[in-house]
Each structure stands twice: as structure tokens, then as C-alpha cells.
Image: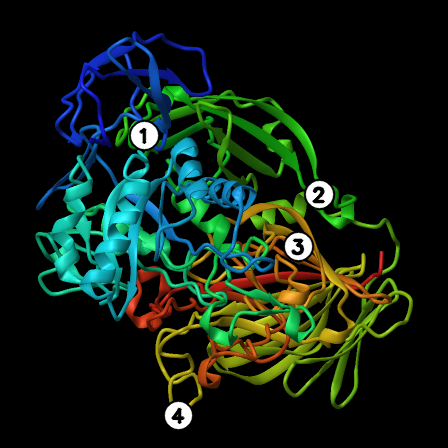
Amino acid sequence: KIQFNNLKKGCHLVASISPVGTDRGTFVPQSISLQDTVSVQRISVNWKGVKTWTPETPNLYLMTLSLLNEKGEMIHTYQERIGFRTVEFKPKDGLYVNGTKVIMKGINRHSFHPDGGRTTNREISLQDALLIKEMNMNAVRFHYPPDTHFLEMCDSLGLFVIDELAGWQNSYDTSTGLILQREMLLRDVNHPSIVLWSNGNEGGWNNALDQHFADYDIQKRHVIHPWADFNQLDTHHYPAYLTGVARFTNGYNVFMPTEFMHGQYDQGHGAGLQDFWDNYTRHPLFAGGFMWDFCDNAVKRADKGGILDSETFNAPDGILGPYREKEGSYYTVREVWSPIQIKKQYITSSFKGEFMLSNNYLFTNLSQCTMKYQIYAAPSPLKGGQQSLLASGEVVLPSLHPGETGRAVMQVPENFFEGDVLQLEAFDATGKSICNWTWPIHYAADYFQKQRTLISSDETALFTESDSTVTLSAKHVTVTFTKQDGKIISVLNSLNKQVPFKEGPVAVGMKMKPIRSTCRMDGTDAVFCVNYVGGVDSIVWRMSADGLLNMNAVLLNRASGGGGFDDAFMDEQVYNLGLTFSYPEKECTGMRWFGRGPYRVWKNRVPGTNYGIWHKDYNNTITGESFENLVYPEFKGYHANLYWATIENKETPFTVYSASDGVFLRLFTPEEPKGRQDGVNTMPDFPAGDISFLFDIPAIRSFKPVSQHGPQSQPGNIRIKKGDEGIRLNLYFDFRNK
């Protein structure tokens, strides 16, 4: 529709288009006759060969409308960047773009930056849109019409948009609302990225305005009321995993939560996303979801010495920090929402270079993408501890239409098993990285034996014992235990300096009570064995002649009996399970490790971390609050799939190796945000002690209690049958200060 003022008789319009950003295609200008007595006219023009706009192929055209008088003289010229696409909402079916049912992977974004508050600029809009795309998102929603330059970024980079008339809990009155609605629609109506209109948020709609969206929108795009089940599209906010009776996965309306995975502090976003997404995408009426929120809304306060103020707990909800610092969930979302998904597998000796993968694009055939592999050596500190590239090459991707599954193949190089980490990285049709995935090439015990370097020596380890203690020693390393409970009370390294690692092992998630201990020599090894009742059967400490101390614990092999306790010897619901030790946080300067990293994890937020050798200096970052010294990744917390870790200390560093698979390393306890609401903790409880080795860890919530999340967020439970050999926690400690 075009509005004319004082149109003279004989005027006509010439419409032309030219592709934006490319020389492809030429289109013949079209002449359109006009009625001089009609102020608002609808025109129709056909061009053959235009390429449609999608978030995966955001083809744009510069449209020029030239108004000419009856002599052919130019009166006025208007230009606007447009895209060609259809959009249709089908009740009890879904949202269709260009005839394809779409699922929106979205996030809510405020126009906000610390240095300008709600006044942003084109550079910020470009930065934000690129960050959203990098997370493999394809959609964005706002609580008010955004800056035009942000919509332009959505058009050009490819993001679906829900454009929203402002209003929250209370709506505009009709007279005011009609004015604002008209201004929004006239300004934004031609952006191809906009696929839905929104009338207010969370009760902030005026029903009298709904019918007027179509007055200005020739496309008649669907109108929603965010958080309501309205107009046959259920947008319920912050659903539980099992929401609900006669709605969502149990209903017959299309559903699309316009807010979910609330990300206050370190909660939400990627934590628990996999469960929600797997559950929803199995349902034919799912149209997508929008996370809350894009970035922490903290403003730089000139009146308070330049502090960044997020009004305590009200605005630190972002997956990014105020200056767009990336939190751990950023990479989790990038992996979970990757348009290429790889089926879970382990690398074993029978590996033939094959991967099963699926195409989760909406419009793109996988043949338009590429994939590469890299094989890395990740030696332990015993062999230098520096990661290096051994081999690389191409992965052959199958031709898969969206929704199809097939097999990708890489040529396995001869030196494959000399490596320690396999990485795959996928790239889209433009060469942009989509996602990368990693696998360890060796199980933990095999890796350790491959890395271990024995020091040639004619010496043997020794043990000494008194009435109350046992001491194991070799290569000037001395470790002393109490006989009564088998705990470490002293560690002296090869320089005769005290290593402050002690007061363990202590059981986590279970009980253990020592019943006897023995010492013996086994060849050149000195052995201290402690037997227990409860969740731990035995712990064997073995000092070898090379100065390495092995802890081999057998857990959870008793199927019946109280284990010597009046009540259960294990937690009914397991949030943490393993063994813990004490270590003074103030003496730790950093950590270098091989395992998943570089970000910490929660039970429901492991994706997005990758295997490799990582390093972090100590920091005390409080996620979403330490704005003046916001260092990501956070240092403290749980780290997944430990192979080895060097706990750095100015004088007495030490390294621990895991010969057990799937061990989580807990490193200290993150501080709770000082501004948290009503003093309620934002994180689950951490175990006692400071450094823990665990087989299970807790999930973190997202707005609702963990009990209302999916299966991966739930506490573990223990099942033991007669004859079970138990779980082995097999660690090696190197206190030699090498």
C-alpha cells in the first residue's frame, strides 16, 4: 500500500529492484498506472527470478519507487531495502515461511548498553546481531519496537523478529495505543525479518488494538499476546518441563514460549535447555521459544563513581555481560541449537571415521556446508603439557535435506591413535563456523598409562607407622595419614615444602566409616589400605618408587544391609557423589588441566565445553555481578571429564590425574551474588571441603525449581545389585614439584 498526497492527473509510478550486496540478476523496471482520486493505493508488481528471504539466506533488494508526471518528469523518489518471503500462521499446525514450517530459536533483547543506557547505535546493533547469530539462534524478540538499525541488521544477517507494541501488565489506553501502534507499523511494516506482531507483554495489551494491526499490514501477519494462550498460539512464559494440562505438548494449539530459560546470574539459558528442546521439538505443534535475556542490563552510573548498576537482582539476566562478555551458557546454546547435530558416540579402537548426524536447518541442504577435522596431542605435564596439532583434513558430509539424518565420513589418518583429542568443526555456506565438537581418543586409564613416565631408580618407596599415623614416601615426597580414619594430614613435596592438600578423603553424597587399616610393601610400592563400611568399600593408597601417589577407591558395591549405619549409607537423592579434600583457596593462583573446558559446568549444562588443555588464572568472578572485574570463564566450580589438573601455587603446585572416566573436578565454592533476592541462594549447595572428585554433580535451576525441569536436571539415584563390582575412583597425585 502506498499513500499519496495531492496526486495530479496522469501521474504514474515506476518500480525497480536491484539485489543488495551482489551483482546477480537484472530486473526490468515496472510501470504502474495510478488513480489521481485515491490517496491510498495498493499496487502489485511481478518480477521473475527473485531470491526469497530466509534467516539462512537473507536475500535483500533495494526497491526504488519513482513518481513521474504525465510528461515523464520525476516528481519524487523513494527507496527502501526489502526482501521477498511469505509468512502464514496455520492454526493447529504451525508458522510457515515460504511454505516451510519453521521453529524459532530465539532470545529476548533490550536496547541497552552500559555507556548509553537505552540509547544505542548501529555498531552496537551489528555487534549484538552477530552475537545472536553466532549462538545459532534465528530469532529475536523485544518488549518495544527496537532501533531501526537493529531491524536492518536482522534483515541483512537473517533473524526472525517479533515486533512488539510496548506494554507490561498495564496497557496503553486506546487513544494513545492507536497512535503508537500506527507509528510502529508504518515504520516497520516492510522489514522482511518481522514475522509476528506482538500487542504488549504479560498482560500489557489493549484488546481494542488487535484488529488494527491488519489496517497497516498488507501481509496480515499474526498477532500474539506474550505469555497468553491467545489467537490459537500459546506463548506461556517459563513453562515447566511437563507444562501442562491441555496445552503445550498435551494440547492442540501451536505453542511457542516467548520467554523461557530465564538466565538470572548463572541460572537458565543453556542449563536444562537440552531436555526442554528435545521434548518440544518432538511435538508437531512446536513453533520455537525465546530465552530471557540477551545481556545483563547494567548502566554505568556517573553519579556513583562509574559503577555498573543492574539494580541488584532485577537485571543480571543475560547470557552475556553488560559489555557482551560471554557466559558459559553462550556456548551451550550454540551447541544445542546448532543446525548440525551429531549423535552421541565414543571413540574406541574400532573407530572407522564415521559419524551419524542430522540436518536441523530449516531451508538449507547439508551439501552446502563443509566440515573439517583436527587431531591434537594433549600430553600431560609428565610429557610437557603443551597441546599440538597432529593431523587435519576434510570430513565428507552427506546431501541431507532439512530434517534428514545421514552418515558423515572422515579418512582416519595412520597416526590417529597417537593423538588425544578429535575435533570436528562445521562451516555454513558462507564459511562461517557453526559449531565444533570434541572427543577424547583414549579412555582415562589408557591415557594415563600412555603418559606416565617412570623415573629410573634403584630405590623403593617406604612406609613408616606410629600408633596414630602412617607415612608413605618416595623420591623425597612424604604423605602422612591418620590410622584412625585414613585421612591425609600432611604432604611434603620433593623440596620438603608443605603442600596444603589434606583433611580428606571425606565422603560426599554417602557415608563411610573406617573399620581397619593395614600397611605393606608390594614390590617397590608402599601400600596403605583402609577398609570401610557404608558407601565406600576400600581405599588403597599406593606410593610408587617414582614418587606418584595412587588413590584407588571402590565405591557403591554393597547391595544390602545398613553398611554399619542405622539409616541409609547414601543420599536418597544424589546431588554430589564422590570424595572431597581441603585446600586453602587463598594459596591457589590458577589451574591448568586436560578435560572439558574452559567453562565450568552444571549437571544440566555440560554441552558447549570441549576437550583440550586449558588454563585459567584464579578469579573470584560472581556471574552477573562482578561487573567491575568480570572475568570469564569463572575459575571456581565444577569442571567435567577430568584427565589431569595442575593446581597452581607460587611455591607448591601439584598435579592430579584421573584414571577413571567421567570424573568431575570441583574447585572451591563460587560466591553467591550479594544482591540476590531476599538472600536466597542462586546456586545449589556445594560439597564440604575445597577440592572434590565426583561422579555426580547438581543441576542449576532456571526460574522454577529444578524439580520442574527435565530428566538431565534431576538428582541421581543409586542402584546396587548383589555382585556389583562397584565404581572405582582411581586418581594419581604428583607432589614432586616437577
Q: Which is closer to the viewer, label 1 or label 2?
A: 1
Which amino acid is tagged 2? Pro
Residue that appears at 15% across and 39% down: 220
Q: Secondary structure at mark 4?
A: loop
**Badge 1: few (under 14), some or many (20 or more) residues near its Cα, within 10 Å?**
many
Residue at numbered disc 4: 566
Q: Earlier in the sequence, mark 3 or mark 4?
A: 4
- Disc 3 target residue: 644
Task: Please name the residue that numbered disc 1 is placed on.
Answer: 54
Q: Within the image, what quadrant is residue 657 found in? A: bottom right
Amino acid bearing label 3: Trp
* Mark nearer the N terminus (4 vs 1): 1
Separation of disc 4 and disc 1 at Cα?
65 Å
What kind of residue is marked 4?
A: Asp
Q: 413 or 513: which is nearer to us?
A: 413
Cα separation between marks 3 and 2: 10 Å
Residue 356 at x, y percent in the picture: 36, 32
- Helix, strand or loop under label 3: strand
Using the rendered image of the protein, determine whether residue 537 is visible from the camera's viewpoint.
Answer: yes
Are dots 3 and 4 in contact, CB under 8 Å? no
Q: Are marks 3 and 1 in contact (CB under 8 Å)?
A: no
From the image, tell me which residue sits under label 2. Answer: 379
Query: Secondary structure beneath disc 1?
Result: loop
